[in-house]
Image: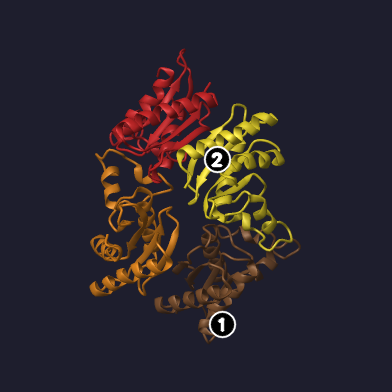
Chain colours: A yellow, B brown, C orange, D red
Amino acid sequence: MITADLARKIIAAGEARANAIGVPVNIAVLDAGASLKAFGRMDGAILGSIDIALGKARTAALFGMRTEAIGEFSKPGGTSPGLEQTNGGLVVFAGGIPLKADDGQLIGAVGVSGGAVAQDLDIAEAAAATIGN
Amino acid sequence: MITADLARKIIAAGEARANAIGVPVNIAVLDAGASLKAFGRMDGAILGSIDIALGKARTAALFGMRTEAIGEFSKPGGTSPGLEQTNGGLVVFAGGIPLKADDGQLIGAVGVSGGAVAQDLDIAEAAAATIGN
Amino acid sequence: MITADLARKIIAAGEARANAIGVPVNIAVLDAGASLKAFGRMDGAILGSIDIALGKARTAALFGMRTEAIGEFSKPGGTSPGLEQTNGGLVVFAGGIPLKADDGQLIGAVGVSGGAVAQDLDIAEAAAATIGN
Amino acid sequence: MITADLARKIIAAGEARANAIGVPVNIAVLDAGASLKAFGRMDGAILGSIDIALGKARTAALFGMRTEAIGEFSKPGGTSPGLEQTNGGLVVFAGGIPLKADDGQLIGAVGVSGGAVAQDLDIAEAAAATIGN
């Protein structure tokens, strides 16, 4: 389970990495049911990325997969064209990572947005590493 | 007409096939008016597939066609670009199958989601076979 | 946790009571995160009640309370006017009951609609009694 | 301006008060443009209150007033019937407080939900007191 304390640590780890690479981002942490647990917008992070961080975390929680993996399914020539239009709209590029317990069970997800996609992914991985993911 | 009893049998047939191939899915059964008749989420089925199973069944019921056939119309180069945006959003990859009476009349649809697209289709076909479709 | 098997039993118990009092209804079972687990529409149940059954179950799951208790907060003169407009719209009359484990933890909710409100509540209570609630 | 550091302190002050009175809540902090700056859901806070905490903070930020003051305008007999339906839906009961700088300028808002309305207000006031409001 993602406690409030753990959610704060996950966000703090992401923000530490974001500061290290010099890009302010929004970070959202959701529980296994895709409900918001905690959110933080770093000073200077762009407003349009709030919704994207939330959407990446939601997408990763709903499917138990990284957002870019969903993007593989929905891209032109993929198995599931239009998948990104389901569930009220998904975000299907990198920066959303499912969070799993030691036994592999899905316990939530983290979503990061505000930098280049590669930076967002880098920061999300630092955040997820808090619980060894 | 899809009775409650028949809807349960259709879902049970789909779940039996899903268990046989080892993939937990969501299965929705709708009537000819595209209204929900019955739904079941197997234990372990991912949350993001609830909306997709409902959407596949809805798409198949609204058009009286398999969802992937609608995908042919809406794909790049198809006759009906953007078709998937109509009706509040359609799901246009395989896993939704119309249900027809012996005389060919549309009586409803079944939608399956949770596995790979080919698995979803396999399970939907097992479900539809309940009434000889 | 509400397993698929338990969800089916909850719906069956509700339908048995509905048959006993002669009113066809829609019954929805959701998990603790307010995601759909199972749904059944009895033959003859009115279409407009599908959304209401889903909404009652969703409201009861989101707040861990019976829907009519939410109605007390939101009614004229209540503490929370307009509460029913939050969360994309709540249903605040009887027929939604939270489902709790023996230790009191919320594990989901059941929602019933199709008859008079008192009948819906009667049927929802029969459904919830499946797990001793 | 509400910095990320200040937003965290505002939430922490609210959570300290919530712990003191024994009610887990959701706390949202928005900036002067009504965009989300930080959010925290305490362990045990009900899911239905996530949207309400966000809505209270949004309402207070949009109007620069406490949410219950908006409720006075929109209540039966008030000057602005239906006001709560504007802006995509407002939350017009207590628990949302605008945050103002020493010179009186609006810099954001805090919204709290999860307990009784009087408790939510109590906690929101403790949160707002962080900056002397």
Q: Is residue B130 above or below residue D28?
A: below
Image quadrant holding the C terminus of chain D, namely top left
Q: Which residue appears at 61% of the width and 75% of the height?
A: B122
Comparing B88 with B39, the one in front is B39
**Can you tell which quarter of the image residue C100 is in?**
bottom left
Q: Is residue B94 above or below residue A105?
A: below
Answer whether residue A86 is visible to the viewer in this image: yes
Q: Residue A125 appears at what percent x and percent y?
A: 64, 42
Chain holding disc 2: A
Question: Which amino acid type is marked by label 1?
Answer: Asn
Q: Residue B47 appears at what percent x and percent y?
A: 51, 58
Give the class, few, some or many, for how many residues have Cα within 10 Å of label 1's Cα (few <14, many ≥20).
some
**Can you tell which quarter of the image residue B39 is in?**
bottom left
Comparing B33 with A128, the one in front is A128
Give the class, few, some or many, for how many residues have Cα within 10 Å of label 2's Cα (few <14, many ≥20).
many
Q: Is residue B83 above or below residue D17?
A: below
Q: Which residue appears at 61% of the width and 69% of the height?
A: B67
In this figure, what is the number of numbered marks?
Answer: 2
Q: Which residue is mark 1?
A: B133
Q: Is residue B124 left or right of residue D123?
A: right
Q: Which residue is mark 2?
A: A28
Chain holding disc 1: B
* SS category of the residue bearing label 2: strand
* SS category of the residue bearing label 1: loop
Q: CA distance from mark 1 to mark 2?
A: 45 Å
